[in-house]
Structures are given as structure tokens and as C-alpha cells.
Amino acid sequence: MLKKHGQLFLTIAIFFDSIVISFSWLAAFYIHFKTSFGPPPRHTIPDIDIYLLALIPVWIVFMSSIRVCGLYQPQRGKPLSGKFFKIIKVTTISVLTLAAVTFFYREGDFSRFVAVYFFCLVTILMVVSHLLIHMVLKKIRSLGFNVRHTLIAGTGDLAQFVAKKISLHSEYGFNIVGFLTSHLERVNSELGGVRVIGTLNEISAVIHKYGIDQLFIALPLNAHDEMEAVLDSLGEETVDIKVVPDLVKFMNLLSGVEDLDGLPIVNLAESPLHGWNNVVKRFSDIIFSSIFIIVSSPLLILLAIIIKFESAGSILYRQKRVGLDGNIFEMLKFRSMQVDAEDETGPIWASKGDDRRTRLGTFLRKTSIDELPQLFNVLMGDMSLVGPRPERQVFVEEFKKSIPKYMLRLKMKAGLTGWAQVNGWRGNTSLDKRIEFDLYYIKHWSLLLDLKIIFMTFWKGFVNPHAY
């Protein structure tokens, strides 16, 4: 929404942050090598050209961290403390990343004290610069400069939703003058603190009377006649016209507008994993699953031996599950039940005190250790380390008819662990809550969120009272 204005403020933010990063980096060099502040240098003073050249990767790392942490995303009415916390995350991640890179880079000698000074300077100065930008924009708006007078055609849920969104982006300088309605009796009433100042038939007169600069047409889907009449009446007006399609209730995941050779396409649901995001997630899956397989290999071998000797049957249990985009794959687990456990019952969920389990299987299922072979599913690409848990096809067919938005889970590759699981929604718990948490994860996916879920899995995700 308001893309051009968003790009303007994004450019301003990048410009000032780039100045802060460059200044902090060179100031840290000067403080350590050119002043008596702090411990004296242990080696000869390096050529500043090395540090000037290093500014390029430093800037790239910071911009990448800013994108990952969402520093430039609108605060949506949240307190400034949230932005300052994000700045600290950005500087911490960036400096740690740079420290890791310089550990392997031996061509130049980068001082650890410079890194410490740089971290302190860049954190403080980024906080100050973002605070100053916020204060300046607020002052400019309070003086009435660069304010655009906005009119919203419509009074329904969509129109009120547009007004709410605009009010959350006060940095754009839009002043909502009022609503227009198709019902004469609603004129002069108030909706969310904004007055209804006229009818749709009076739109041209209202535009001239109040000096409107920007018009948002937010009419419901069934208001075809009103939409056509409004657009016809605007033929001689010079205001900026924005049409908001009444599709908000249908929008899921990463919805938005795309361009197809000049043709606007409204995208209602799309996975966040495309382009580099997909590459990054797949790369992290390969790295982490390989490490976990190597580390857990003694345990995997030991459990395989015990399972083989405890009861007849295979060590691994293969079960068809529904994965990304509805594709079927074979999920691996350590066998925790008697052979042919579902011959009499058919596909059912395990329950408390289930007598189909083996003695070892009871422990394996309770601790989720039976899921460890899925690391090989992750390595092969059938699954991801983190994502919505895969379900059996028979249950997918049942749930998609009774649970709204259930199939949106399949827009992300199935995971060994997930946001719902680490928050306690697994096993015999509320399906609605599991879907809610799964969709939250898909919509807000980031590599940092994946890492958080992995750490939470180690902390509290293995043992669960609902795991039978």
C-alpha cells in the first residue's frame, strides 16, 4: 500500500543508515589506532585503505541483517522501543557475522577492539538517527507540510479497514478528511473518529470543497453500479485515485499485487519461499540435518539394534504423508508399534494408553525420538527441519472440508518440528489452534524464526503430555 511513499522513506532510511555505518566503522578505526583511548594497539597500525575496502562487505552484511530483522517494516502503531530493539538485533547479528568472517580471512589484520568500538558506536548512532528521523517527520506533519488530504468512498468494513491502515502509517502524511456513503441518512455520522461528510453522488463537490488530493474507492464487491457511477463522475477531476478491491477477507499468507506486462494481478495466497528465500532454507536444511545426523548417529544405531531385538518387524516405519503443494512422500520413523497395528482399526491417531505400542515405542513416542529418522527426509528434500507437521492423506481429505484455510499449510514444505509444536499444539490437541500457529509461521517465515523454533524444540519440544 502507498508504494511510492514507502520507497521514498525507505530510501531516506537506507541513506542515513549507510552514513551511520560508514562513520562508525571509520571512527572505530580512528579511536583505536589514532587516539590514546583504551588499550594501545598490539601491532603496527594498518593502512586505512584495508578498512575503507572492508566497508563494502560491512555495508552488505548490515543491509542483509536489516532485511532479515525487518527494521524498515512499518511499526503499525507500535512503540518506538520495538524499533530500537530491532536495531540492537541488527547490529549484534551483523558484528557477530563480520567477526566470524574475519576469523577465516587472513589477508588483513582486523582488530577486535575496533569491532567493539564499532558495535557500540553503530548501535547508539542508529538509535539516535532513527529517533531524529521520527521526530523530524512528526514535526513536519504537525506544521501542516506535505500533508495530503484524503477521502474514502465507502463506509463499509473495507472502507473502515482502509482508514485504519492509513492511520497506522502517519509517516506518509495523509489526513483523512472523511467518508462518502451511498446512504443519505448516514451523512454527518462518525466511524472510528472519522466523519461521513457526504454521499457518493456528491463526490465531485466534496473534492473541490475540501481540497482533496487523494481518493480511495473502497466499495464492496456487490456495489458494481456505485463503482461505475463514481468512476464516471471523476473524469474531469485531477485527484489521485486508488481503488481498493474488496478481497481482504480472501487474502491469506503473502497476498499482494503483482504486475504481468502492465496487467495488475491480485495475489491472494503465496508461499514466502521463492527465489533466494527457498535457496537459503534448503541450504540451512542440508547443513543442520547433516550435523544432527552425525551427532545423533550413535543413538540412531543403538535404537535400531534395540528395536530389532525387541519385536519382529522392520526397524523403520514408512508412512505416506502429504507434503508441499499436496505431493505425497514417504515419511520415516522408528517403528514404535506392533507390526500391522492398523489392520483392525484402520487409520487412527494414537491415544493415551494405546496397547498397540511396543515397550520401547512408548518411550520413543513420549520423547519424540521416534521422529529422528525424518532427518533423512530433510536431507533428501522431502521435508524441512521447520514447518507444519505433515499429515496422512486420509486426514487431509477430512480436515480440508471442515477446517477453514487448512490447505494453506501445504504452501510450505512439511517440517520435523514447527511453531505449533513448540507452543504445545501437537498430538491430540485443538486442530484450529494448530492451523492458526502454522499459518502464522508461514506468513512470518524468516531464517531467524526457524532458528528460534529449533532452539525451542531442544528446550521444550521433545517431551509433550499429548504425545502418545
Image: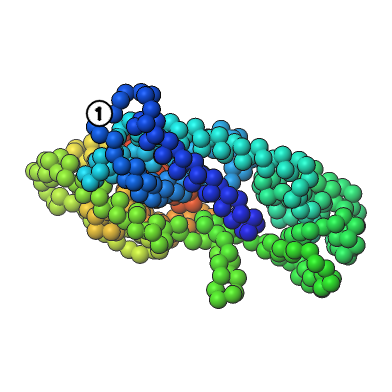
Q: Secondary structure at mark 1?
A: loop
Q: Residue at x 66, y 37 (%)?
A: 135
Quadrant housing the N terminus: bottom right
Front in this rendered view, residue 350 or 198: 198
Amino acid identity at mark 1: Arg
Tell me where residue 341 appears, x and y as whole percent. Answer: 24, 50
View extreme (bottom): residue: 261
Tell me where residue 140 appears, x and y as whole percent. Answer: 72, 43
- Residue 248 visible? The answer is no
Quadrant housing the C terminus: top left
Front in this rendered view, residue 276 or 265: 276
Q: Residue at x 43, y 35 (%)?
A: 27
Q: Residue at x 35, y 64 (%)?
A: 327
Left or right of 291, for residue 201 = right
Tell me where residue 47 appears, x and y as whole percent. Answer: 31, 42
Vertically, is 264 above or below 268?
Answer: below
- The part of the image, by quadrant, that contains residue 336 is top left
- Residue 39 visible? The answer is yes
- The part of the image, by quadrant, that contains residue 83 is top right
Q: Residue at x 69, y 61 (%)?
A: 244
Left or right of 414, for residue 5 = right
Tell me where residue 87 appears, x and y as whole percent. Answer: 49, 38
Q: Which residue is mark 1?
A: 42
Vertically, is 438 above or below 360?
Answer: below
Left or right of 247, for residue 298 = left
Front in this rendered view, residue 189 or 303: 189
Q: How many marks?
A: 1
Q: How is the image coloured?
A: rainbow
Query: Badge 1 local density, few (<14 within 10 Å), some, or many (20+)?
Result: few
